[in-house]
Structure formats: structure tokens, C-alpha cells
């Protein structure tokens, strides 16, 4: 196989997986956007977390909500629980890495807020613990996962699962889901920004 053939294969696989996911779960994505809108309209905040590439996605999506996505609008309350190295290393050192998100959810989350866990495998114990803690606090819960969803999807009231175990392809669909949700939230909250 040539490098160009490999490139084409990767791109085709990514496109095929996105097409499959949104074809099968488009209504669920729209329901998720409405859930986020409900949280923001009630004055709640969104706490987003994951490991590795999913940590980067958490930061990326929190920035889209707090700053702006594509239209000028007021900031929306979102926070990535992956950015404070002092908290992350203190909890991992003094307790256990499994607790790095759960401790922050317990400190920052309130009933009506939303905890959004991201895991490409669906098996991340610290993401599960964060979602479990959120449910204890009467928070809403959302998971992005891959494969069969795993314990991460099972821990959330709303789960969007990409049907693949290929980590890069799952990550590509996850960030597309995130961008679609950002756009839909803006569209639903600020329809006047999209007129004309």
C-alpha cells in the first residue's frame, strides 16, 4: 500500500464512521443539545472531563462555550476539569487517580449542572467515578464514548457512543459531535443570531 492509498483509506473510514453515527444517532444528538440548552437556561454550568485526547477535547469544548462558537453571544458557563495540574496531581498523589474528576465534581457541581465525561474506550474508571459523583449530586450526566459504550456510557443518563474501537476515528467523531452540539446550542438559545 502506498502512503497516498493509506491516506485515502483513513479519510474514507473517518467519513464513513461520521456518516454512520449521525445517521443512526442524529435525533439523540439533538436531544443532547436540548439538554445542554436546558442547563444553560436554568443558570447551570457544564463540567467536562476525560483523559489524554479526551482531556484536550474537554478543554476545546469548554472554550467554545465560554468564548463563542460561530456567532457573537453571551458566554456560556463551562469548565474543563482537566486543566488544573495542582488539583489533578494533588488528588492523584493523596488519594487515587480514579478520583481526579470525582473530587472536582463534588467541589464544583450543583444540582441542575451537567457533568460531561468523554472516553474513547468507554472504560476510563476516573470518568465513571466523575459521572457517578454527579448523579449523587442530582446533576445531569452526559457521556461520549466509543466501542459498545462501556461503563462510561452506562454511568450517564445520556450517552452518545461511536461504534468503533479505533481510537483516532472515535476521537474524530467526538470532536465533530462537540462542534455540532456547540452550533445547535447557539441555534436553540439565540435563534435571532441565525436570521437572514
Image (cartoon, grey):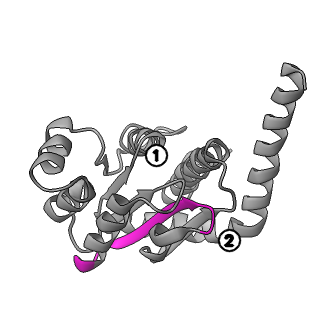
Secondary element at image label 1: helix
> Which residue lies at the image location 40% right of the left edge and 43% below the top edge?
55
The magenta stretch spans which residues?
136-148
Q: Residues within 10 Å of mark 2 (few under 14, many from 20)?
A: few
**Which residue is at the front of the view, 14 or 158?**
14
Query: Where residue 27 is drawn, which disc sits there?
Result: 2
Residue to which mark 1 is pinned: 54
Indicate whether residue 137 is drawn in magenta. Answer: yes
Query: Where residue 32 is drawn, which disc sits there?
Result: none
Residue 188 placement (x, y as % from top left): 54, 60
153 with respect to 14 (left or right):
left
Disc 2 versus disc 1: nearer the observer: 1
Residue 153 placement (x, y as % from top left): 50, 70
Q: Residue furthest top?
A: 3
Q: Quadrant of the C terminus?
A: top right
Corner quadrant of residue 112: bottom left
Amino acid at each position: 500500500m502506498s502512503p497516498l492509498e493509506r491516506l485515502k483509506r483513513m479519510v474514507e473510514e473517518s467519513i464513513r464512521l461520521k456518516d454512520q453515527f449521525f445517521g443512526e444517532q442524529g435525533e439523540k444528538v439533538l436531544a443532547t443539545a436540548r439538554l445542554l440548552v436546558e442547563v444553560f437556561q436554568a443558570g447551570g454550568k457544564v463540567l467536562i472531563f476525560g483523559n489524554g485526547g479526551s482531556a484536550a477535547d474537554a478543554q476545546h469544548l469548554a472554550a467554545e462555550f465560554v468564548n463563542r462558537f460561530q456567532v457573537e453571544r453571551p458566554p456560556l458557563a463551562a469548565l474543563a476539569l482537566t486543566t488544573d495540574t495542582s488539583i489533578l496531581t494533588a488528588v492523584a498523589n493523596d488519594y487515587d487517580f480514579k478520583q481526579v474528576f470525582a473530587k472536582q465534581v463534588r467541589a464544583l457541581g450543583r444540582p441542575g449542572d451537567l457533568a460531561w465525561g468523554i472516553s474513547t474506550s468507554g472504560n476510563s474508571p476516573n470518568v465513571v467515578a466523575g459521572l457517578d459523583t454527579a448523579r449523587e449530586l442530582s446533576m445531569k450526566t452526559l457521556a461520549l464514548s466509543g466501542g459498545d459504550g462501556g461503563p462510561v456510557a452506562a454511568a450517564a443518563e445520556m450517552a452518545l457512543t461511536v461504534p468503533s474501537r479505533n481510537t483516532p476515528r472515535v476521537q474524530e467523531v467526538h470532536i465533530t459531535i462537540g462542534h455540532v452540539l456547540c452550533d445547535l446550542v447557539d441555534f436553540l438559545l439565540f435563534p435571532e443570531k441565525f436570521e437572514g
